[in-house]
Amino acid sequence: MTALKTKDNFMLSQQDLHLKHVLGESLSPEELHQLEKWYEEQDAQEETVLHHSDLSADSPEQIQHQINLLLEQISTELEQVRRLTEENNALKNANQVLKIQLFESLKQSAA
């Protein structure tokens, strides 16, 4: 990201220039040129993203296949979360039993 120096030697990014412009503050000709150049770069980047993410090239069957694969992945991950939750609960219970045993042992030692 390029930045411009102001009269006070303060660096302004393109986003700062955009904000300044949107808020109605005046821009120098150099700042306005830089902002317009940045807008063009942003438009080009957006166009690239939109062009590469165009799903219209995929057939409905391909899209459905991708959805099915994602659903399988979600199902597998969900099962793993369930297993980990069960293991975690078992460890919590075992930890609670050990705490009680430790407390009882300390209580008997103190008596």
Image (tube, helix red, strand yellow):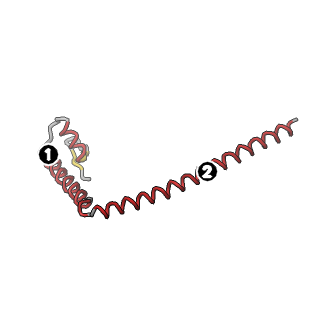
Q: Position of residue 46 (x, y in %)?
A: 22, 54
- The amino acid type found where label 1 is placed reads Leu
Q: Nearer the viewer, residue 61 or 87?
A: 61
Q: Secondary structure at mark 1?
A: helix
**Foreground tag (2 vs 1):** 2
Marker disc for residue 32: 1
Q: Secondary structure at mark 2?
A: helix
For this view, does 49 lie left or right of residue 75?
Answer: left
* C-alpha distance separating marks 2 and 1: 60 Å
For this view, does 92 lie left or right of residue 107?
Answer: left
The correct choice, above or below, for 2 with respect to 25 in the image is below
* Label 1 crowd (10 A; few <14 / some 14-19 / many >=20): some
Q: How many marks?
A: 2
Whether the residues at callouts 2 and 1 have beta carbons within 8 Å, the answer is no
Q: Residue furthest front?
A: 61
Q: Earlier in the sequence, mark 2 or mark 1?
A: 1
The correct choice, above or below, for 108 with respect to 13 in the image is above
Q: Position of residue 87 (x, y in %)?
A: 63, 52
Q: Residue at x 25, y 61 (%)?
A: 52
Q: Residue at x 17, y 36 (%)?
A: 25
- Residue pointed to by mark 2: 86
Q: Residue furthest right?
A: 111
Q: Which quadrant of the view contains residue 18? A: top left
Q: Which quadrant of the view contains residue 57? A: bottom left
* Label 2 crowd (10 A; few <14 / some 14-19 / many >=20): few
Q: Position of residue 13 (x, y in %)?
A: 25, 47
- The amino acid type found where label 2 is placed reads Glu
Q: Residue at x 88, y 35 (%)?
A: 111
For this view, does 91 lie left or right of residue 110?
Answer: left
Marker disc for residue 1: none
Q: Position of residue 76 (x, y in %)?
A: 50, 58
